[in-house]
Image: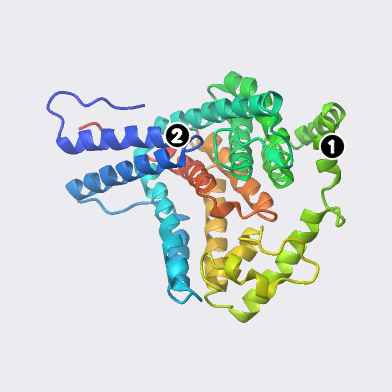
Amino acid sequence: MLSVPVSGSLPRDRVELAGVAALMGLVATMQISIAAAQILLAVAVLCWLAMHLSRAERLEAPTFFWPLVAYAATTLLAAGLSLDPAVSVPDCKQLFLFMLVPLVYDFARGERADTLLSIIISVGAASALVGIVQYGILNYDNLGRRMQGTLSHWMTYSGTLMLVICATVARLLFGSRDRLWAAFVLPALLVALALTLTRGAWIGAAGGAVVLLLAKDYRLTATLPVLALIALLVAPDALSSRVNSIGDMSDPTTRDRVAMLEAGTAMVKDHPWTGVGPDMVGHVYPAYRTATAVQANNPHLHNVPMQIAAERGLPALVCWTLFVISALVGLWRLRRHAVAGPLAAAAAGSIVAMLVAGLSEYNFGDSEFLMLLLVLLTLPFAAARTPAPSR
């Protein structure tokens, strides 16, 4: 919980308190407004820097942060050697979001981490209700007009719902507090995700849930087919048709995703070391477009590993892979920790969901999604730290 400075506290402790407050505001707004969340991120980073400088402390972060730093370095190199640096260099501003990792690691120690997860789940539930109202009342109920909740795009919305569902299931299965609240809001989250008509997010959420159920008790996975059957029986026609189109090569979007992989493979062959440059895939796609492609152009390749390799090069893909492996290994080590264990389950489910959904969508490049993912990944490592002493 927040430590309130007593009379005579040093200014640097008030700076830390301001940083914690900014972080909590950031976590509360990142599913609502990317602009507000990024402003609060800047405030929190300034407080974090001031705190470290005043205490002459060295930077500490979970192990998975260092492959992210290497990924950022390879991205900057790819931007400098891009086919058009004027396009690629500005795109690198998203790397600033990686500062969330050391920020959360310092400001969310101990019980604060669990409080932040409660905020994430509660805001996600409110966002789910907004989406359900959009679907049921405002006619956001078809592929041409999909519900987007409190965010600017339905893909972003479905991706954040997917992560919140994994966090909620983890708290329900492994948590020691607020499990009743998790059980209460989970149906709304599931309904909202289903109504987004986003197949990749459906499969990603299922993948994350399977991992969590297996970790708790493998027999629980038997509930998934039953729940899926019930959902299909009561689902509207638009949802049923989307389910039936999964893996159907006659479906235009499925066929186009295969064509994007073929185009991406050709880009990697031509530019294996630094790629075509960040944010350049859309510019060069027409030159690599195959005869089976549906869309004339695509801004990205709807696949995280392929997108990274094509626009940033194979070294960047290696760094990203090391980030994922390092995060999973660290979470495995925390699985039995009394405080961090439930948070580690939430993070593990989230990263598995990201990987599964990332085979059909470039979710790692979505700022709102990336912010939520990095916070969820860092919370268990912060919870495992000794709380900062009151000064």
Q: Secondary structure at mark 1?
A: helix
The reply to whether residue 375 is in sight is yes
- Which of the 4 image quarters holds residue 241? top right
Q: Nearer the viewer, residue 166 or 380?
A: 166
Q: Nearer the viewer, residue 339 or 158?
A: 158
Quick one: label 1, few (<14), some, or many (20+) residues within 10 Å?
some
The numbered disc on residue 259 is none
Residue 88 place in picture, x, y as percent: 47, 67
- Which of the 4 image quarters holds residue 106? top left
Name the residue type under label 2: Thr
Q: Quadrant of the C terminus?
A: top left
Quick one: label 2, few (<14), some, or many (20+) residues within 10 Å?
many
Q: Earlier in the sequence, mark 2 or mark 1?
A: 2
Residue at horizontal 56 percent and vertical 53 percent from the top: 364
In the image, residue 297 above or below residue 53: below
Name the residue type under label 1: Ser
Inter-mark Cα distance, 2 to 1: 33 Å
Q: Nearer the viewer, residue 230 or 385?
A: 230
The reply to whether residue 110 is in sight is no
Q: Secondary structure at mark 2?
A: helix
The residue to which callout 2 is attached is 29
Number of numbered discs overlaid on the protein picture: 2
The residue to which callout 1 is attached is 240
Residue 361 place in picture, x, y as percent: 66, 53
